[in-house]
């Protein structure tokens, strides 16, 4: 046993205050890791790549990024295909989730001009993964919108449904012979709420309670259109699966009061239910409570109709059931309490929801305080998905924790060990059909508005070094041991 592996095991035992037992992972649970194009590739203007809305924002609004950094070079993964694949393989992980940069393969956004050098990059990456026995899982959209479309309104322009479909067709045509697992869209909430309501992600707009709802509608329609495109024209030949990734934190009522219970339910509907409910329930529509609260508040504010645009019967039919699996990104949990209505004024989705979220200060804290380790919240969200969204197959497409330690990331190791224990309870006791556990992230990356100030990676990346040297962290050793023993430790 190598020193590092020994260290991991010692760590696990030394934290045990009582007896420790080992628990086996189910044979069919896939262990994986992930990244996304803008966060790792760099080469922002190389080989014919077009400009994305992220390129534009980091270059014109450096104040939007904590350390004023950019993803211009990031981990330089565009030039390190073989090396990166080797990092994954050496841990024994079976799958790698990455995303395609829309403007790298369609520099002008539209499908009129395909950048073959961009296509070649993804071909090489996919081939290298497959040659090394690693299954590629591809996300079509992890937030890299071609800048031209942003100038036309981005996700608030209804034409995006057509633009996205054209892009998806190019992707399926070029890579669908080898890629069998597709995720249309990563995290609608970040695309709509963080980007159009709270303004921290590109394009950085703050038109809350209006633009975020228009965006939500267009994201759902774009996802549904792409799902049907794949089902109708590709799936019978390419034989893959297609779904969407929704980030779902758990929201626990702050007290036993009926008001807080209702508030926690509203918090879930305003956070992820607005995306999951239309796809995964027979209604095909936004959740009732979500529609009701926005409509009532809009009326009180003097709007002639709800600020939430509705779906037609036809659109509802098209959205309903459009996923072969539920892609879940889970990081953390909050408590939720009810709050009195805000005075009438500028609209916002927070005012619409009438909730307040907070974290327990005792929860294990990450390098950024919004990330807390709450393993029981993970089990609760999994059970919620089973009970409310038709007991789907669940692919955990991201889960992770940003440790403040560069290499000796013991908190991250504890986070994963604890969450894997909860996962085992979910599968064995609650009968949730979880198929994949994907660690965010393969290496430290450009963490959006947090720049390079936090790292979730299994490998540390030296962003000062031209080589972007990757160094294994303790969590990397944990996963290496896990893929061989397929065993987690539990204190009893
Ligand atoms: C995103 C990742 C991001 C991670 C950690 C998720 O919301 O999909 O791109 O890096 O959270 O912040």
Image (tube, rainbow, N blue to C red):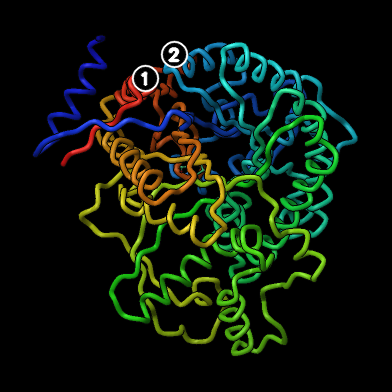
Residue 196 in view: no
Asked where in the image residue 338 lies, by quadrant, the reply is: bottom left
- Secondary structure under tag 2 reads helix
Q: Residues within 10 Å of mark 1 (few under 14, many from 20)?
A: some
Location of the C terminus (image quadrant): top left
Residue at the image position 57 percent from the left and 15 percent from the top: 133
Please give the label number shown on residue 46: none
Asked where in the image residue 189 lies, by quadrant, the reply is: bottom right
Along the line of sight, which residue is nearer the eye, 399 or 76?
399
Along the line of sight, which residue is nearer the eye, 311 or 449?
311
Along the line of sight, which residue is nearer the eye, 413 or 93?
93
Residue 433: x and y in percent read 49, 45
Q: Is residue 134 left or right of residue 20?
A: right
Q: Is residue 151 left or right of residue 380?
A: right
Q: Residues within 10 Å of mark 2 (few under 14, many from 20)?
A: few
Residue at the image position 59 percent from the left and 81 percent from the top: 292
Q: Which residue is mark 1?
A: 480
Q: Which residue is mark 2?
A: 90
Residue at the image position 34 percent from the left and 70 percent from the top: 253
In this picture, is 30 found above or below 221? above
Residue 315: x and y in percent read 79, 64
């Amino acid at each position: 046993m190598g020193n590092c592996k020994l260290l991991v095991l010692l760590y696990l035992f030394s934290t045990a205050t009582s007896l420790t037992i080992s628990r086996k992972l189910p044979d069919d649970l896939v262990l994986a890791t992930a990244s996304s194009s803008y966060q790792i590739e760099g080469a922002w203007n190389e080989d014919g790549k077009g400009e994305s809305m992220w390129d534009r924002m980091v270059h014109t609004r450096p104040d939007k990024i904590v350390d004023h950094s950019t993803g211009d070079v990031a981990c330089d993964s565009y030039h390190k295909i073989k090396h990166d694949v080797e990092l994954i393989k050496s841990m024994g992980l079976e799958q790698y989730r990455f995303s395609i940069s829309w403007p790298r393969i369609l520099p002008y956004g539209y499908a009129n001009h395909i950048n073959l050098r961009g296509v070649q990059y993804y071909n090489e990456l996919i081939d290298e993964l497959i040659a090394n026995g690693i299954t590629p899982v591809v996300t079509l959209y992890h937030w890299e919108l071609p800048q031209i479309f942003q100038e036309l309104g981005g996700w608030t322009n209804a034409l995006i449904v057509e633009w996205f479909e054209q892009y998806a067709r190019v992707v399926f045509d070029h890579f669908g012979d080898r890629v069998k697992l597709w995720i249309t869209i990563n995290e609608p909430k970040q695309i709509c709420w963080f980007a159009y309501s709270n303004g921290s992600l590109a394009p950085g707009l703050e038109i809350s309670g209006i633009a975020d709802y228009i965006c939500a509608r267009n994201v759902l329609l774009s996802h549904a259109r792409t799902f049907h495109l794949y089902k109708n024209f590709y799936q019978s030949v390419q034989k893959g699966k297609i779904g969407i990734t929704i980030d779902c934190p758990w929201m626990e009522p702050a007290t036993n009061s009926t008001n807080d219970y209702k508030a926690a339910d509203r918090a879930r509907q305003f956070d992820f239910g607005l995306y999951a409910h239309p796809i995964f329930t027979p209604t095909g529509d936004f959740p009732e409570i979500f529609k009701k609260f926005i409509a009532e508040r809009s009326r009180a504010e003097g709007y002639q109709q709800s600020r939430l645009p509705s779906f037609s019967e036809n659109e509802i039919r098209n959205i309903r059931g459009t996923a072969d699996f539920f892609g879940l990104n889970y990081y953390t949990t909050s408590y939720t309490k009810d709050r009195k209505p805000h005075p009438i004024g500028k609209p916002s989705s927070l005012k619409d929801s009438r909730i307040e979220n907070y974290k327990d200060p005792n929860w294990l804290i990450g390098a950024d305080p919004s990330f807390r380790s709450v393993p029981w919240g993970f089990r609760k969200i999994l059970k919620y998905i089973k009970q409310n969204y038709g007991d789907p197959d669940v692919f955990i497409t991201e889960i992770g924790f940003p440790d403040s330690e560069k290499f000796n990331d013991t908190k991250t190791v504890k986070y994963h060990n604890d969450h894997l224990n909860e996962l085992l309870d979910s599968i064995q006791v609650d009968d949730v059909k979880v198929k994949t556990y994907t660690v965010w992230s393969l290496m430290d990356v450009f963490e959006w508005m947090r720049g390079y100030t936090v790292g979730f990676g299994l490998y540390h990346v030296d962003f000062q070094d031209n080589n972007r040297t990757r160094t294994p962290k303790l969590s990397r050793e944990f996963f290496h041991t896990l893929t061989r023993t397929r065993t987690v430790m539990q204190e009893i």
